[in-house]
Amino acid sequence: MGEPNKNTEQKGKSSLIKDEIVIHIRGLKKSFGLNEVLKNINLDVKRGENLVILGKSGTGKSVTIQCIVGMLIPDGGELTVFGEEVADLKERQLKELRMKIGFLFQGGALYDSMTVRENLEFPLTRVLRLSDQSEIDRRIEEVLDSVGLSDAIDQMPSDLSGGMRKRAGLARTLIVNPEIMLYDEPTTGLDPITSREISELILQMQKKYKTTSIIITHDMECASITADRIVVMKDGEYIAEGSFDALNKSKDGFVKSFFN
Amino acid sequence: MADEAIPGWKKWLEGGGDQVIFLKGFFRNMFRGGFEWSEFVRQCYEIGYKSFMLVGTTAFIMGLVLALQLRPTLLNFGALSMLPKSLAVSIVREIGPIITAIICAGKIGSGIGAELGSMKVTEQIDAMEVSGANPVQYLVVTRILATTCMLPILTLLGDVLSLIGGFFAINITSNVSALLYFNKCIASLDFTDFLPAFVKSIIFGFIIGFVGCYKGYNSNRGTESVGLAANSAVVTASLWIFIVDAIVVQVSSLLFYK
């Protein structure tokens, strides 16, 4: 099943969803050697929407978002972000597109030779090319306050807990005000309480920064908290789509296995 | 499975092609605007200053041992007065640059390989790339230029400490004044001794930085690959250092020592 099911319930948590399609994917294919990871992905993501992608490990969830941000070049199909075909973009155009997209990696991917402050300064000085130190400091303090990490500003990543690292990674991603946020398993490796806190933080940040989000997760609590819409992925294809409550009532055995 | 089916020679050629592309990326980003001066200075400090003790100690001991080994041979030929000259020429032309380069390949090359390898494994390089920053300019250009600039300086310092080591060795058995010893050393050297050694140490520095960065930047995703990147950086850089040394010695012999 390639085309998303159009007759599914759309009960979004967010009132920010608009009709504008920011990510448009049709017939996306990606293989690594003989391993066909993405077979036929079709997906539209609306501005302001929180989309959760569910699926077993190795089904191509991360590959999909890596294609969206241009880390991987698809073998076939159509993938446009803000109306631009990602595979056709030149280096400079891709850089400009990436400035509008935030990517939160599983482990936070903090630069471990830098303090939290320097981690946050990095995209401001290298990507946005800001030079006014007072503006840089203001932005850092504001975003750290948003994620509840003001006290850790001068700590090294190695001194932070798993949850704090995710918060710092989120802060570094949000500091450039991206329009789209891609979360790669944001709650993996965290205890249930911290997982819930991170999930709620994702929702808060989406409301505050008015981002469109794609969240890859196995964590059903994270999905229930954050998702406006969920797509379920199996063997490189999307097999079901709908709100959390709608999919919870699904008769499909594979879909049910996530909710049970 | 598919990877195993690729013949060895094809993998070797692919590896060579990857290195050429990496080298092109280095030069392209080196001349692009927005050079990372602060990171370059930090790398010079990490690579140069923090290697000084190791290079200096090893060079001092090498000079000392070389003088002790040379002394009985020269004594047999009644040419003991040639000891400062023999020491100075062998240290400046060959021992100084090669010992410094091999030590730095072990210390700096493995460090760069492991650092970039672990950054790759923990997705820090990917994070830089997807944020729109330029990881090659920030991580690769600065490190390669820092090793290229620091190696000649470390080599010069190593040469001086080797000669001081030689002076100490001579004074174990004889009583030679420092002024006489260093005057004889300096008088026995000329421009043609320094130039090939200087050029060589610049090339060695570039090799150490380039190989370390290439191995680390292109390491695989597992934690095992970090160790492999570090190990491979040392082995490959050391091999290239000896190959380049042999070539430079041949070329400088043809040009200067006919």
Image: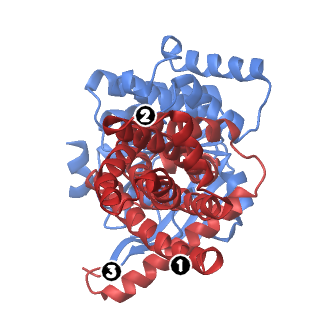
Q: Please tell me which residue lies in front, A64 or B67.
A: B67
Please state the chain letter of the residue tagged with numbered disc 3 in the rendered image.
A
Residue B169 occupies which quadrant of the picture? top left
At a point 59% along the width and 68% down the height, the residue shown is B23
Q: Tag 2's secondary structure?
A: helix
Chain coloured red in the rendered structure: B
Q: Colour of chain A?
A: blue
Image height of A76 relative to A251, above or below:
below
Give the residue number, with chain letter if any, for mark 2: B53
Answer with left or right where residue A191 lies relative to residue A159. Answer: left
Q: Which mark is residue A34?
A: 3
Residue A100 image offset from top left, x and y in percent: 67, 45
- Near mark 3 (Cα within 10 A), the count class, few <14, some 14-19 or many ≥20, is few
* Of marks 3 and 2, the one in the foreground: 2
The answer for how far apart the CA atoms under marks 3 and 2 are is 52 Å
The kind of residue tagged 1 is: Gln
Answer with left or right where residue B244 lies relative to residue A186. Answer: right
Q: Is the residue at mark 3 from the same chain as the one at mark 2?
A: no
- On the rendered image, what quadrant is the N terminus of chain A found in? bottom left
